[in-house]
Amino acid sequence: MSDAGESLRERLVDAGVELVLAEGSGAVGLREIARRAGVSHGAPRRYFPTHRELLSAVARRGFAELAARFAEVGAADARGQLAGIARAYLGFADERRGMYELMFRHDLLNGDGQEADGPRLREETGPLFAEMARLVGECTGDAGRAPVVAAALWANLHGLAQLQGWGSTRLMLGEGREGELLDAVLAAHLGGAR
């Protein structure tokens, strides 16, 4: 792909990111992205033959940002690292709601290797999950069960992010108890604090 083509492709993805952050995943259409990028409505089809491919390119940006947030977490031990990752995950879900929702809509995205360009989304999420599983194994001392426990923890965090986004946790527990709730989630999957 030429530099001009790569530049236009990136502008289209940039426009998609802006749109999903402003209006949510349901608003991300090829025509609106083209309009925001200042190109003809047919231009996105040269780089993204399907709507799924464009949405997947936008979601990859979200996973890259989430991975960067995970990488910024520093802690002395595995449990502290997992707690930091959990807070980063919940913070991302709160601050980047539209992107967060798109990233986990695998019914809308290419994740099975069918996209014509770029890596599969599984290649974006795999390292994040593998790191969580490694840390869970360190915390629990059971590397064999670590992937299952990490998946359960991720599912719990995802549900918690959804409930917090809808204001449900505040209704259940009152204001300012999110930290306690996160501690309970971690304890449920990792055991009591050591």
Image (cartoon, rainbow, N blue to C red):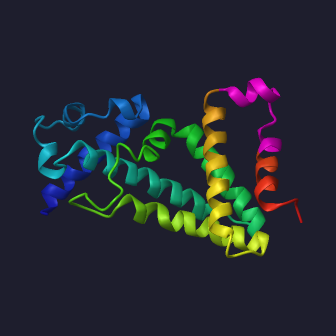
Q: Position of residue 7 (x, y in %)?
A: 20, 54
The quarter of the image holding the N terminus is: bottom left
Report the front residue among 31 and 2.
31
Specify the quadrant that holds the C terminus. bottom right
Q: Is residue 96 left or right of residue 163?
A: left
Overall secondary structure of the magenta stretch?
helix
Is residue 139 located in the magenta-colored stretch of the structure?
no
The quarter holding residue 39 reads: top left
Tell me if residue 83 comes above or below residue 102 in the rendering. below
Q: Looking at this view, is 8 or 125 the one in front?
A: 125
| 155 left or right of 171 in image | left
- Is there any visible trace of residue 120 in the rendered image? yes
Residue beneath the point at 22% across and 38% down: 37
Residue 162 relative to residue 140: left or right: left
What count of labels does the image hold?
0
Residue 97 position, x and y percent, is 51, 37
Which residue shows up at 68% across the image and 62% down it? Answer: 149
| Whether residue 76 can be seen here | no
Can you say whether 36 is above or below 180 in the image? Answer: above
- Whether residue 52 sits left or right of residue 132 in the image: it is left
Q: Where is residue 82 in the image (x, y as percent from the top left)?
A: 70, 61
Image x and y of residue 16, in percent: 31, 40
Residue drawn at x 39%, y 49% is: 59
| Residue found farthest to the top | 171
- Quadrant of the image occupied by residue 192: bottom right
Q: Against 182, is 190 above or below? A: below
Which region is colored magenta? 167-181
